[in-house]
Image: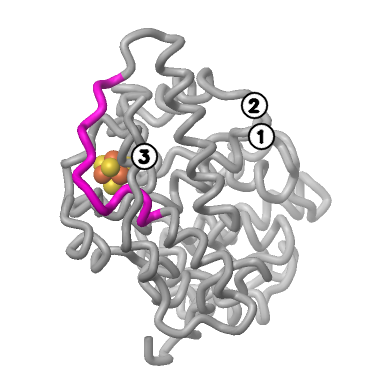
Amino acid sequence: MPKRTSGAAGKGGEASPAKGAAKGAAKGAAAAGKAAATPVKKPKPPQSRTALVRQARRINRELAEVYSYAHPELDFENPFQLLVATVLSAQTTDLRVNQTTPALFAAYPTPEDLAAANPEEVEELIRPTGFFRAKTKSIMGLSVALRDEFGGEVPGRLEDLVKLPGVGRKTAFVVLGNAFGVPGITVDTHFGRLVRRWKWTEQTDPDKVEAEVGALFPKSEWTMLSHRVIFHGRRICHSRKPACGACPIAPLCPSYGEGETDPEKAKKLLKYEMGGMPGQRLKPPPDYPGKPAPPLGAAG
Ligand code: SF4
């Protein structure tokens, strides 16, 4: 196993964290800096199944330390809100959804309310999320189905969720994992990219990725693993410029060197709380070490 290194990048991270919030970010940023002082030798991809499982679980444990506060990055207060927010998150950022949903849920708090809404008014409210006509059809359609077929409640079973308009397996797993405590793997663009970089799978089809990665971990880890991997993809292991020189799992990563390896330059690529910026949620959980996102139209 490659030796971990220690470095200075961990001293960076936040510009001015709120009181009481600094500890977690400092811990995460410090962990992010561990790999950064000296160049890391690129580890070879795991050769055997046993080595792959060991490497995958070790990466998960490291990520659990760095992102002890990992969570879904959509604001929601109940399963209905999470379901609608997840449908709205297609082709846009969680931040934009979080900035849009407060007005939507204030106007239509229940499936019954949204099912009976004027579509043009809904379109106006969700316009900032893009594809607002199709999304209006989906969220009104699923509200009608919830009202007429499920007594106004979001069902807690995969087979029921995927029958709702606009709801695929990815959305269903987000809802099951975070509103019902049912373990699930969420294969979004970040998750797929990172697990391929780690050689956990070569698949690009999300269902196949889900199956192959799921087989490396106990089910009980699936939901939090998904959050941690997505957190890492958003903050450090970016699509175009991964910040390898500030990456806490660099010594374990067979793709180390795909991005910036200079520690100081890599530090500048860190995002959200790792880079001292606001997060995506307007109402993050209490243990989130960064700053909340600004409301729609506010600076920042
Ligand atoms: S590619 Fe770079 S940033 Fe991504 S996990 Fe590997 S070392 Fe870290």
The label nearer to you, 1 versus 3, is: 3
* Element at label 2: helix
Residue in the picture at 73% in, 42% down: 181
- Is residue 88 something one can see in this rendering? yes
Q: CA distance from mark 2 to mark 1?
A: 6 Å
Report whether 267 appears left or right of 192.
Answer: left
The answer for how far apart the CA atoms under marks 3 and 2 are is 29 Å
- Gap in angstroms between the C-alphas marked 1 and 3: 31 Å
Residue 283 location (% of width, % of height): 62, 75
The quadrant holding residue 44 is top left
| Residue that carries the numbered disc 2 in the rendered image | 219
Q: Nearer the viewer, mark 3 or mark 2?
A: 3
Marks 2,1: beta carbons within 8 A: yes
Image coordinates of residue 229 in percent, x first then y, are 45, 44
Q: Nearer the viewer, residue 298 or 110?
A: 298
The residue that label 1 is drawn on is 183
The segment highlighted magenta reads 32-45
Residue carrying label 3: 4
Inspect this view and state whether residue 71 appears: no
* Amino acid type of the residue that numbered disc 1 sits on in the rendered structure: Pro
Task: Say which residue appears at 52% left-offset and 53% top-offset.
Answer: 67
